[in-house]
Image (cartoon, rainbow, N blue to C red):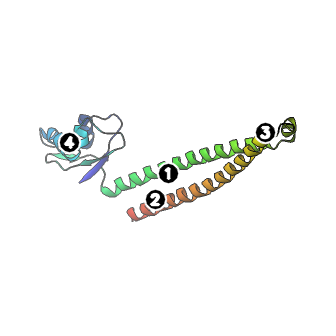
Amino acid sequence: MRFAVLQKDETLPELVKRLYRETQAGSLSRAERALRDQNPGLAAGGGAGGAIVVVPDVPGTTATAQTRDLPDVVGFLLDALGDIVGSLKDVLNTAVDRMEEEAQDTLERATDREFQKAFERHSDVRNLIKEAADAATTRIDRAKVLRAAHQTIVGQLGEDLNHLSELIHR
């Protein structure tokens, strides 16, 4: 049994033409039925681009070079997961950087001598400024902890995917 990756907006007839070569008249219609039977999602109107499709052997056809064996498909999936992990790392870095920058900006404003001096006669505002500075310091500390945690987790995911890929390609 072989596998293939569904292309974006690919119809079932297009998929059949891409995956099979007819060696016997009428065999492509059998191939379409076999694909539908093996991949119920295709019968329901197709699947998402990038979905893995089971490509059954169909008498009277030969599979094209567009089909892959199981290790190749697993390698494709691991590569896709690696890309996702990389994107996740970027998103998390951006979010934590923004969190830390905003907190740092707040802390700088709240600890600015001239800013504090402007409100020295208003104890209620001074207290709010101090609370804002304390909260900003807490957010900065939290951002550092989050950054370290997500770098560890994402790094371990990357290592695990690399290890799996090495095992598959032995």
Mark 2 or mark 3, which has the lower sequence index?
3
Residue marked by disc 4:
36
- When the figure is inspected, residue 161 is found, relative to residue 112, above or below; the finding is below
Mark 4 or mark 3, which has the lower sequence index?
4
Mark 4 and mark 1: span between their CA atoms? 32 Å
Counting from the top left corner in percent of width and height, residue 47 is at 30, 39
Q: Are marks 2 and 1 in contact (CB under 8 Å)?
A: yes
Mark 2 or mark 1, which has the lower sequence index?
1
Figure quadrant of the C terminus: bottom left
Q: Residues within 10 Å of mark 4 (few under 14, many from 20)?
A: some
What kind of residue is marked 4?
Answer: Arg
**Foreground: disc 3 or disc 1:** 3
What kind of residue is marked 3?
Answer: Asp
Q: What residue do we see at 57% from left, 48% from top?
A: 92
Mark 4 or mark 1, which has the lower sequence index?
4
Mark 3 and mark 1: span between their CA atoms? 47 Å
